[in-house]
Image (cartoon, coloured by chain):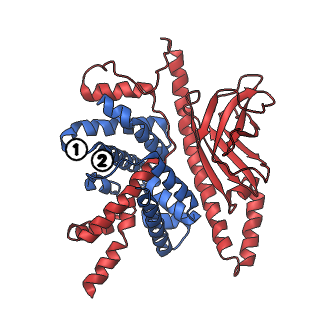
Amino acid sequence: MAMGTEHDDLREQAELYVLGALPPADRDAFEAHMASCADCTAHVKSLSTVAHALAYLAPQHEPPSALRERVVHSVSGSPLKAEPTPRPIVARPGTALPWLAVAASLVLAAALGIYSLNLRSRIGALELRLQEATDRATTGERRIADLRRVADDAHSQLAVLVAPDLLRIDLAGQPRAPQASARAFWSRSRGLVFTASNLPAVPAGKTYQLWVLTRQPAPISAGLFKPDPSGRVDAVFETPSDLPQPIGMAVTIEQDGGVASPTGDKYLVGL
Amino acid sequence: MAELYDRHARPIYSLALRILGDTTEAEDIVQEVFSQAWKQAARYNASRGAVGAWLLTLARSRAIDRLRAKRARPGDVSDERVAGQLVDAGPPADLLVLSSEQVARVRAALDELPLLQRAAIELAYYEGLTHAEIADRLEQPLGTVKTRIRLAMLKLRDVLAGTV
């Protein structure tokens, strides 16, 4: 039946529609069909919850406290009333210098953000190529060998990123470093890759320490690191093969040389 | 409005920052979204959960529009409504507030997806690419990309439904 076929063809576009991935002409055609098709409307509705959930998967960052006042003031046209704020607002001295520092850090954050997006996109493309090669293992031995050689040459990091048992943990900045963020990739067979951006510089005599959280009560130290002057970290750590399954990671600041269990302030946490 | 802000600003800001990678632009998006919400306050008398979903949908549309505008090359056909379709759809009145456990399950399910599926979903949702652009970016046939997106979305939907 022509009608049935058309409906089936269009229904298969519901997932793309919900993600906003249909080009304009296809989108309009789908919307026109949906207007008279309860089945497709219900299907889209059931999928739209997924899109809603995706919105919450972005690494969570606290918006600057000044933004709250600006928004509330601009929309209500009246001064901000003394309503409770979810986080304490840090008082700033009334000089221009802290604002310069804030402005500078925003510029830096923007640059790092774009850089990390590009890097992520590149790593993603390499991951995919290697994955595809792995899928064709039985028929494309030579291609795998080529790609593995490329990967091995490129980065020891990539070895972790393409591990079949790869686990990814996103870490969010804590009140001591609200602009900081990080991502850890862990594979039992190949170790741990840790990248972070916007981390504050460590004071003399101090170091950052990365902790692996497992179902055991005591966090396990993965290693020590210091960010480069731009606040960026790219580090690879070896982890013991009998490490319990990680359920989260955290970064604290500690005395140089590290400590057996965390004592300092938390800068990044991911669960 | 202050209450609305305190309840929703963080996920809105975070989503805009994820899409645009720029704190100043993310702040602009937050301001625009709340400004629009304020102007249209009479139109959303639905449940609180639906308001949150609607605000996030507005935020994503505006952020993606900006991203596309930045990406647009001279000569490109402009289409200001590419991301706008979700806005027009409006918030389903019965959309539930997602629990943090549900979000965690979707995150885990997303991470467990084959790389191609995960990448396709992320490129569509966070970068606003169409299926053809995703196929280009991932160097995959269009049909493959469509199929993978369908499989991934159905899988994620089932993960969510199983926890409601």
Q: Chain of mark 1?
A: B
Quadrant of the rendering where the N terminus of chain B is positioned: top left
CB of mark 2 within 8 Å of CB of mark 1? yes
- Image quadrant holding the C terminus of chain B, namely bottom left
Kindly identify which numbered label has been placed on residue B164.
Answer: none
Tell me the quarter of the picture where residue A250 sits.
top right
Q: Is residue B149 visible?
A: yes
Q: Is B22 left or right of A39, judged from the image as shown?
A: right
- Residue at horizontal 55 percent and vertical 42 percent from the top: A113
Q: SS at mark 2?
A: helix
Q: Chain of mark 2?
A: B
Which residue corresponds to the image point at 47% horizontal and 41% vertical from the top-left? B17
Give the residue displayed 67% in from the left and 72% down from the top: A133
Q: Position of residue B140 (x, y in %)?
A: 54, 71
Farthest residue, direction left: B42
User: Residue A102: image x %, image y %?
Assistant: 52, 25
* Chain letter for the part of the structure drawn in blue: B
**Disc 1 secondary structure class:** loop
Pointer 2 residue: B50
Query: Hey, what amino acid is under mark 2?
Result: Ala
Cα–Cα gap, marks 2 and 1: 9 Å
What residue is pinned by disc 1? B44
Q: Decide which of A106, B157 is in the foreground and name it.
A: B157
